[in-house]
Amino acid sequence: MQKEIVSHDIKSTSQFSVKGIFLDDHHWDVYKYDHGDDLRQVEVDEVKKMLHCKDGSRGFFVYHCPRCDESRIVYLGCNSRLCSCCGKNYTDKWSKSLKKAMFDVVHRHIVMSVPNVLWEVMKRFRRRCLKVYMDAAISAINNTLSYFLNKRVMAGVIVVLHPFARDLGFKPHLHLLITEGGFDKKGRFVRKRFIPAEAMRKTWQYQVLNRFRDVLPGSPGFARFIDGLFKRYPNGFYVYLPKKSRITSKRKVGRYVARYIRHPAIANTRICGYDGGTVRFWYKDNEGVTYVVTMDVFEFIEALIQHVPDRQFKMIRYYGAYARRWKSRFGVYVQESITQSKLGDFSQNRGIRCPVCGEKMEFVMYWKTGPPSKEVFGEKIDDWHHLSVRVDAI
């Protein structure tokens, strides 16, 4: 991997895509053949889903315009962790759901991380470390708020794990949306506008290292390593509150979620070059400096798939007052419970407009698999009538 600083902004384009790079010249097939024994099954499955995104094999919806008789096919996405397009769509839906679910109080955005000497340990023991890594954050927040409020309180915290850095390296860090204060034992919300990030650093360090000590191999060498980190970082671990992190209304949540909280490891618009053997992409660091990274295509594939989480691992977790067991108790502060969009709701929520006349199109059918190769699609709705016995209309 090569990295260089550029003095100009790079214009975003959609000329290249992650899917196209994986498919070109059978790069993914070659990589899978060479590294088959080292690949996790979840990595193989997520790549497979991405490569079949919107190709018809996963099914599609059919719509009909009642005004001009136009018909339209909408193919299903893949929802792969690697897909830039589906990742953005999921983020948009999640942010809308989140706005309805959040307590109607001020929230703050916080970033928490650990020194790079722990990254390789977390990568090697990811099954043991990543969950307790997220658990440690809520303990650090509740303990800090309780100390400065002189009473035990429970904050509402939404924790999102980002395993990747902007250069696609493994750099596990946490983005958190937390209530500006917490609930006391009587269920009353106690505000705390000033959240002491510096004071939280030591508590964060204590929670992380002690939890790692409990779940990692209990060798004398590792115990000395943990003790050494307390001495090496006397001021604690990284806790950052962005200057404009105060979210005063639910309407601002969507913008924050899209920019900071949940997004794919790399968007197609960040890929600025591909010649069949190397991939070039850009990113900006926290200081606004633009870098261009050049990777061999197989190095690029490896950098991407390493961030696929293990199956059933939740990258987004709801803690404290947002946890399911506590949320109903504080329902006066929230309008609706946290919900995910369901397939059965699409006909009411999806506003497909006719590309010819602009009329809202009517849902006709949902086809579970790819269209038969001999059929003519998209010309007249009559083409679909004889297929109705084989589809599930919703």
Image (cartoon, rainbow, N blue to C red):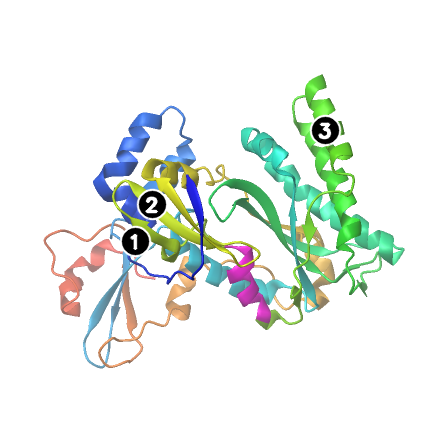
The three-letter code of the residue at mark 3 reads: Ile
Looking at the image, residue 272 lies above or below residue 297: below
Q: Which of the two marks, 3 or 2, is nearer to us in this view?
A: 2
- Check residue 279 in the rendering and tell me which mark sits there, or answer none: 2
In magenta segment, residue 261:
yes
User: Disc 2, disc 1: CB below 8 Å?
Assistant: yes
Residue under pointer 3: 226
Nearer to me, 244 or 69: 244
Nearer to me, 53 or 222: 222
Q: Looking at the picture, how far across and down is residue 220, in whole percent?
A: 72, 18
Q: Dot 1 lies on which element?
A: loop
User: Disc 3, disc 1: CB below 8 Å?
Assistant: no
Residue 253 seen from this side: yes
Nearer to me, 324 or 232: 232
Q: Considering the whole magenta stretch, tell me its main secondary structure.
A: helix
Image point (71%, 54%), residue name: 326
**Which of disc 1 and disc 3 is earlier in sequence?**
1
The three-letter code of the residue at mark 1 reads: Phe
The three-letter code of the residue at mark 2 reads: Val
**Which of disc 1 and disc 2 is earlier in sequence?**
1
**Which of disc 2 and disc 3 is earlier in sequence?**
3
The residue segment tinted magenta is 252-262
Residue under pointer 1: 16
Count neighbours of disc 1 (C-alpha within 10 A) and say few if under 14, some if 14 to 19, many if 20 or more: some
Q: Is residue 8 left or right of residue 332?
A: left
